[in-house]
Amino acid sequence: MKERYLIKPKGEVRLAEFAPDDCGGMNKKDARKILKADKKKLRDLQAKLYAGQKHALLIVLQAMDTGGKDGTIKHVMSGINPQGCQITNFKVPTPEEMAHDYLWRVHKAVPEKGKIGIFNRSHYEDVLVVRVHNLVPQNVWSQRYDQINEFEHLLSENGVYILKFFLYISKEEQKRRLQARIDEPYKQWKFSRGDLKERAFWDHYMEAYEAALNRCSTPWAPWYLVPADHKWYRNLVVARIIAQTMEGMGLHYPAPEPDLDKVVIED
Ligand code: ADP
């Protein structure tokens, strides 16, 4: 699964050639079983990560509006110990954040050793929404791809494993999901007219995503392109890739104090 959805470094992925409704020939029932097993694995692996305090894992989630970032967090991460997990939502920068370089707020939110950090949006907004709306001049945002690669390299050299997921939905699926936010009372709170404005820039966003995926998928911080029209398949793919990555991290509980068998606990 990792290989199938990995963006090769210096890749030339064209989103138009990729099917957001792909479900890898799998059915929902089997997928549910695999997801359940992977969630159990994640719980066990996280316990070791937390106990070992040697590495951190940073998971970046990016998507168009309604793309499923919140749902992915809810369904994939729900089994793990909240104490070892931190979620950061990146919104429009505050005046204080704007007064610093764009990575300032990001670096502060990187998980400490022992923890899993989830970025719900991330520094990639600075080459996505910022690029699409020219919030800074082109000569400024165009330098950011290399800067981001270097920043992520620094993190990786300091014990942070990085996984980046683009949850890719089709424009038609976004329409269905936006409509559901209008029609279903319990979803109405999520609807914002601003989302419709952004939808009008769909093609520009796809171009910006292609650039981010192709220029910033590196051996130390790979991008995965996740077909996300089917929520059950999206959850499965993300959980599988996180579990496979953590299995490769060589996690284990720290060695116990010596001679534990000789310890007697007095009444
Ligand atoms: P979400 O859609 O993630 O649930 P919001 O509806 O509050 O949360 O949207 C957050 C908004 O903040 C998005 O429109 C996103 O593009 C914007 N944003 C995030 N980072 C930046 C940034 N660096 N510069 C400008 N806008 C940003």
Image: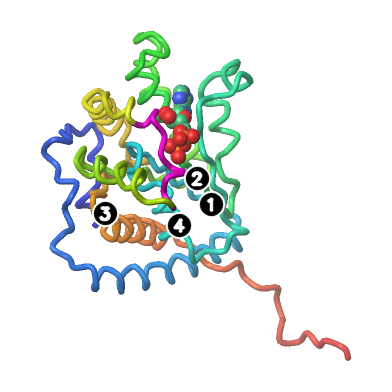
Q: Quadrant of the N terminus?
A: bottom left
Q: Which residue is mark 3?
A: 2
Q: Amino acid at mark 4?
A: Lys
Please report whichever mark, 1 or 2, sits nearer to the chain's N-terminal start.
1
Image spot of residue 200 (x, y percent): 26, 25
- The residue singled out by tag 2 in the image is 160
Instruction: Find the distance from the CA under tag 3 to the CA under tag 2.
Output: 19 Å
> Marks 3 and 1, how far apart in space?
21 Å
Dot 1 or dot 4: first in sequence order is: 1
Q: Quadrant of residue 99?
A: top right
Q: Where's residue 228, x and y in %? A: 26, 49
Q: Is mark 4 within 8 Å of ligand 1?
A: no
221 displayed left or right of 110 = left
Q: Nearer the viewer, mark 4 or mark 2?
A: 4
Disc 4 residue crowd, few under 14, some 14–19, many 20+, Cα 10 Å: few
Residue 260 in the image: x percent, y percent? 71, 81
Front one among 65 and 130: 65
Q: Nearer the viewer, residue 150 or 86?
A: 86
Q: Are marks 3 and 1 in contact (CB under 8 Å)?
A: no
In this picture, is 37 found above or below 199? Answer: below
Amino acid type, label 2 = Val
Q: Is residue 88 positioned above or below 137 on the image? A: below
Q: Which residue is mark 4?
A: 74
